[in-house]
Image (cartoon, rainbow, N blue to C red):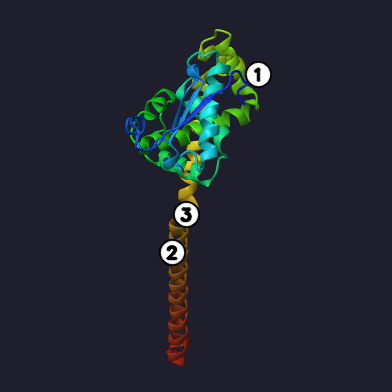
Amino acid sequence: LVGLEEPGPPLRVVLVEETEDLARAVPPWISGFARSGDSLVVIFPARVPSYPDSTLEGVLLHEVAHVLIGRAAGHQPVPRWMNEGLAMIAGSPWDLGDRSRLTLALFRGQPPSLAALDRRFAGSAGEARGAYALAGAFTQDLLRRNGSDSTAKILRGLADGLTFRAAFRRATGQSPEEAEDSFWGRYTFWYRWMPILTSSATLWIGITALSLLAIRRRRQRDRQILQDWDAQEARIDRPEDESIN
């Protein structure tokens, strides 16, 4: 996933109880963090499951991925959205919960830029969960459209001394902004409008509209039938001599 041929030196994994000072210093929705330069992974087991990982194993894989991402990039800065998106892929498969959070995040307004998305990770728990879902979706899309080794190529470019923008273009043939515009253009429709169009509320609105249309047409037919009957009765009731005249 990150392109390393050799994983590097061992990692140190520390399990922290909720009573310890380090746990109190970290927001309660964070179940773990990593420091790539120190080859350190810290996990708060009592907080599992916590989005984006649902198991202790998932949290461990997620945080180990962060360390390996840093190594693959030569410890050059990696945008938070890509770092978290890759760690999500390593930690657990994309599932219905991720799609639901993505839909909710897109319902809240205009899709954020990737730069704005990075800032959301430092926001509230709700903002961070939405940021994780968006980052995961964008990274999944990046891999699908550019090949399973595309993120490894980007990280290799960073290790070679390229800027992220240059490494991204070399690996994908697009700038990050072009890839972002393409992603939002496709996903905004599927994840913002399709749930509305296929929801039970929309279904019942459609059924109600069809029922009202059917009632209206039935009433129109009934009025026409009554008018035809009235016309027939009028012809029957007319005197014979009037019909001759």
Image coordinates of residue 157 in percent, x first then y, are 58, 13
Are the two marked residues, 2 and 3, in contact with CB atoms closer than 8 angstroms? no
Residue 173 can be seen, yes or no: no
Are the two marked residues, 2 and 1, in contact with CB atoms closer than 8 angstroms? no
Q: Identity of the amino acid at label 1?
A: Glu
Q: Say which of 55 and 10 sits in front.
A: 10
Q: Identity of the amino acid at label 2?
A: Thr
Residue 75's place in the image compared with 92, above or below, is above
Identify the disc placed on residue 6.
1
Q: State the CA–CA distance, disc 2 to disc 3.
A: 14 Å
Q: State the CA–CA distance, disc 1 to disc 3.
A: 48 Å
Q: Secondary structure at mark 2?
A: helix
Image coordinates of residue 140 in percent, x first then y, are 57, 32
Mark 3: few/some/many CA within 10 Å (<14, 14-19, 20+):
few
Q: Residue at x 54, y 28 (%)?
A: 64
Image coordinates of residue 71 in percent, x first then y, are 56, 17
Q: Residue at x 47, y 45 (%)?
A: 100
The C terminus, quarter of image: bottom left
Q: Secondary structure at mark 1?
A: loop
Residue 78's place in the image compared with 188, above or below, is above
Residue 244 can be seen, yes or no: yes
Comparing marks 2 and 1, which lies closer to the viewer?
Answer: 1
Q: Say which of 12 and 150 sits in front.
A: 12
Q: Identity of the amino acid at label 3?
A: Ser
Comparing marks 1 and 3, which lies closer to the viewer?
Answer: 1
Identify the disc placed on residue 156.
none
Q: Secondary structure at mark 3?
A: loop
Residue at mark 3:
199
Identify the disc placed on residue 208.
2
In this rendering, would 23 be left or right of 146?
A: left
Q: Earlier in the sequence, mark 2 or mark 3?
A: 3
Comparing marks 2 and 3, which lies closer to the viewer?
Answer: 3
